[in-house]
Structure formats: structure tokens, C-alpha cells
Image (cartoon, rainbow, N blue to C red):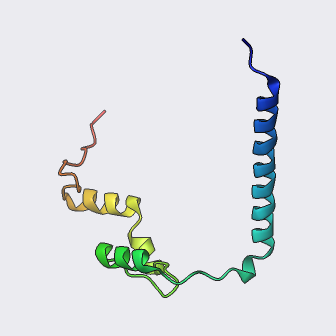
């Protein structure tokens, strides 16, 4: 037996409506970005902040100094310069002579 095209049509129509609604929602948010107010941290976010020991401001964002020092490239460069082992215990790769 063959599948009736009605189910495919309904599914496609529903998907297209969801995509259109999401695009309209994104457009609205971009136009009204100045009206968006961050929610205060809930109990789970506060607990995770305490457990992970992150320093954040009142809006839940990390300060610029903390973000600049926590980029993966900065840590990797620092560990290679000091000759320290990485977090997984592996030695840094030595440059091979051509």
C-alpha cells in the first residue's frame, strides 16, 4: 500500500507555520531588544554558580576580565609556555624539526 499524501501535506504545513512563527518571534525580539530585561537567577542557576565557583555580576554575566582570561586559547598558550601538564594529564606536543 502507498502512503496517502494528506499526512505529508499536513506535516509540511505545520512545519512551515512553526518556522514562520519562529521568524516572526525573532524579528519582534530584534526590534524590541531595548525592552528585554534579564530574569533574576533562579534556585538552580544560583546553586550552579556556587558549585562551579563562577564570579558573575547581578545580571548573571561574567565580568570582562574573567572572560578574557578564561578563553581556551589563552590557557593552552600559558600551559605550553610554562611546560605544565594539561588538565587531562597529557604532555604538550613538542614541535618537530623539519
Rendered residue at 60%/81% (across/down)? 38
In which quadrant of the rendered view does residue 28 lie?
bottom right
Rendered residue at 65%/83% (across/down)? 37
Q: Position of residue 46 (x, y in %)?
A: 39, 80
In which quadrant of the rendered view does residue 96 lie?
top left
In the rendered image, the residue lying farthest to the top is 1
- Work out whether 88 lies above or below 54: above
Rendered residue at 26%/56% (across/down)? 80
In the rendered image, the residue lying farthest to the bottom is 58
Between 85 and 56, the residue placed more toward the observer is: 56
Q: Position of residue 78 (x, y in %)?
A: 30, 63
Q: Quadrant of the N terminus?
A: top right
Instruction: Judge left or right: residue 70 versus residue 81.
Output: right
Between 95 and 32, the residue placed more toward the observer is: 32
Between 96 and 57, the residue placed more toward the observer is: 57
Q: Position of residue 20 (x, y in %)?
A: 81, 52
Number of numbered tags placed on the structure image: 0
Q: Position of residue 52 (x, y in %)?
A: 31, 72
Instruction: Judge left or right: residue 15 versus residue 97.
Output: right
Q: Quadrant of the C terminus?
A: top left
Rendered residue at 82%/41% (across/down)? 13
Amino acid at each position: 500500500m502507498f502512503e496517502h499524501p494528506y499526512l505529508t501535506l499536513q506535516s509540511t504545513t505545520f512545519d512551515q507555520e512553526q518556522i514562520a512563527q519562529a521568524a516572526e518571534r525573532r524579528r519582534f525580539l530584534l526590534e524590541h531588544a531595548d525592552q528585554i530585561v534579564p530574569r533574576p537567577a533562579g534556585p538552580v542557576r544560583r546553586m550552579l554558580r556556587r558549585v562551579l565557583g563562577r564570579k558573575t555580576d547581578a545580571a548573571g554575566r561574567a565580568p570582562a576580565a574573567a572572560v578574557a582570561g578564561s578563553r581556551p586559547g589563552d590557557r593552552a598558550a600559558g600551559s605550553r609556555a610554562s611546560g605544565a601538564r594539561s588538565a587531562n594529564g597529557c604532555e604538550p606536543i613538542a614541535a618537530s624539526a623539519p
